[in-house]
Image: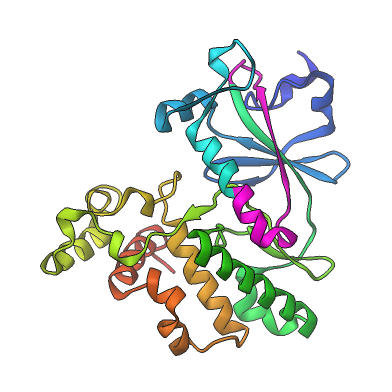
Amino acid sequence: MTESAQFPREFPSWGHEIKTYSPKRIGDGTRMQIYRSTDGKQVLRVPLYTESQLVTRTGGSGVLASEGDPSSEISNDTVSDIDRYTTAKGYVGKNTVGVLPMYFPDQNGNWRTYSLQRYVPKKMDLGELWYRGDSLSETERKRIRRMIEDIRELITETGLIFDLCGSGNTVIDDKGFPRIIDVNMIQPLIPNDEVLTQDFKDPQLEHDVIMAARLDWRGRLRKMLNPQFFSMNGLPIGDWSIRRLQEWETQLGMQTRQSTEKDELYSKYINPLRDEIINGIRNDLFPSF
């Protein structure tokens, strides 16, 4: 057995360099698995899907990671991810943890897009802000407010938003700075008037949409909504994230809940129908929530 045999087959075929990473995962996502380097300084994000699988799902870009090798074609999804990250970094760059995308065959010879990222020790997950926010210094709270303002500008000018919701996606690091860790799931936000497909924009059909959200969001509801409402992992990442941003503003005293409901940024992407849709999905995924 070779030294690399203990590593998952999804790992890159790095030869000797593979030993600089631990085969023990430190995190799991719907698209990536995360491994830490043996010196503790970096993390390697290992995609669950090969580029060939992504090409089948989202189409090919025509760009080859390895010249002359058609099996190395990079998917439209990967190109879109990188383009969105490049755009978003221009607004919130000081708060993101940069990634280095790399194209390599895995240990089965299938091409994947890996990424390297600096490991960030965390003081607090920002998902805990609602009950641990009082433990932050005023300087730390000001830094979060500034990050929120930058994210608002990103949304206003590009319609994009980071995945702000998953555990460990957004943190306060050990030096007291807010960091956006997960930069692989940047999503376009869909305005309220574009959420429903043309066949279901009749207000009289609103009840049908709500019932589909409660009873069959994985099936019937998807036929009623703009395909971009759901991210590639099949979840409403954009809607969850804009609501998380709204919560942060109220938790930090930037706005009241009532004022956010009148805020043009939030009222463009949040309305009672979308609340019903999100609640229906949440109650199915997290019935004890």
123 or 100, which lies in front? 100
158 with respect to 68 (left or right)? left
**Residue farthest right in this picture:** 39
Q: Quadrant of the C terminus?
A: bottom left
Magenta highlight range: 85-110
Q: Which residue occupies 17% across, 67% down?
A: 206
Q: Which residue occupies 38% across, 59% down?
A: 190
Asked if residue 97 lies in the magenta stretch, the reply is yes
195 in relation to 40, above or below: below
Q: Which residue occupies 25% across, 58% down?
A: 196
218 or 224, which lies in front? 224
Asked if residue 9 lies in the magenta stretch, the reply is no
Residue 248, x across and y down, in percent = 58, 77
**Residue farthest left in this picture:** 204
The quadrant holding residue 90 is bottom right
The quadrant holding residue 37 is top right
Residue 50, x across and y down, in percent = 54, 27
Residue 267, x across and y down, in percent = 39, 76
**Residue farthest top in this picture:** 68
Q: How is the image coloured?
A: rainbow
207 with respect to 195 (left or right)? left
Residue 9, x across and y down, in percent = 64, 23
220 with respect to 1 (left or right)? left
Q: Which residue occupies 61% across, 49% down?
A: 85
